[in-house]
Image (tube, rainbow, N blue to C red):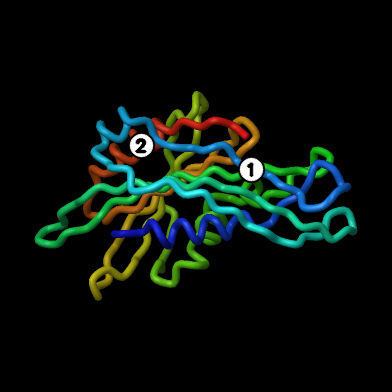
Amino acid sequence: MDRRALLAVALAGLVALSGCALLTGGTLEFSAGPATVTEDAQSAAQYDLVGVDTQSINRTVSVAGQERTVEATNHIATYERDLVVTTSEATGTVVVVSTPQMAVVDRPLNPVGSMSPRQLLEAVAANRADLSDVAVRDNRTTTILGENATVTAFDATTEFGGQSVDVTVHLVRVAHDGDFVIGVAVHPSVMTAEQAGVDQMFEGIEHTGS
């Protein structure tokens, strides 16, 4: 399934809330460092880079009783792999997003950090009307950016080519060098072997902090 546009929009909308380090001056700007997947991991998992995007989001938020304009810059890298399901073609997609943690006097305000995996996926799915019947399947542990990280797998249903298709969604989130790094992967559920490739992609994430 081609999920990159929907995932990018959803994940960008997820980080619209932000804070500031100082309550003086004009627009408060926060920028994440880019997060991508190494070429070795792409090659091993047979995924290709589709594109790397930078998205700036401007919002007016209330911080300590004051209205402030905040600009958050996020980075989104999208990778795809062609799959064949019986006689139909499909696409496995991996999206890696980095978003600044952001805080006011050490008080974290980016909602990404406090959401449970299910809440995080629901926030993504809020802008994805075609993703339904979402249920947690299981959790597993992998190593991302040198740290143990929990990957949550979800069962879900989507529409593709006018038909209902069962998909598996993998979600991981880590805090690294001042940013949150989020990985999301989607593939047809019948392609159970794709989990190994997803883990290779997640384990191959590299990030230069903000």
Q: Position of residue 100 (x, y in %)?
A: 64, 43
Mark 1 falls on what kind of element? strand
In this figure, what is the number of numbered marks? 2
Which is nearer the N-term, disc 1 or disc 2?
Answer: 1
Which residue occupies the foreground of this view, 195 or 4? Answer: 4
Q: Residue at x 43, y 46 (%)?
A: 52
Q: Amino acid at mark 1?
A: Ser
- Residue visible at 19% across and 51% down? 83
Please tell me how crowded label 2 is: few (under 14), some (14-19), or many (20+) other residues with Cα within 10 Å: many
Left or right of residue 81: residue 50:
right
Q: Is residue 173 left or right of residue 48?
A: right
Considering only vertical position in the picture, is 117 above or below 3? above
Q: Residue at x 22, y 54 (%)?
A: 190
Looking at this rendering, what residue extends furthest in the top direction?
A: 146
Label 1 vs label 2: CA separation? 24 Å
Residue that lies at the very extreme toward the front in this rendered image: 26
- In the rendered image, residue 116, in percent from the top left (x then y), is placed at 58, 50
Q: Secondary structure beneath disc 2? A: helix
Residue closest to the eye, 206 or 186: 206
Drawn side of residue 112 relative to residue 128, left or right: right
**Mark 1 touches mark 2? (CB < 8 Å):** no
Which amino acid type is shown beneath numbered disc 2?
Met
**Can you identify the residue that label 2 sits on?**
201
Q: Which residue is mark 1?
A: 31
Q: Quadrant of the N terminus?
A: bottom left
Is label 1 or label 2 in front? Answer: 1
Determine whether 31 is above or below 155 in the image. Answer: above
> Would you say residue 1 is visible in this rendering?
yes
Which image quarter is the C terminus in? top right
Q: Is residue 152 visible?
A: no
Question: Which residue is at the front of the view, 136 or 191?
Answer: 191
Residue 106's spot in the image, x, y percent?
A: 80, 38
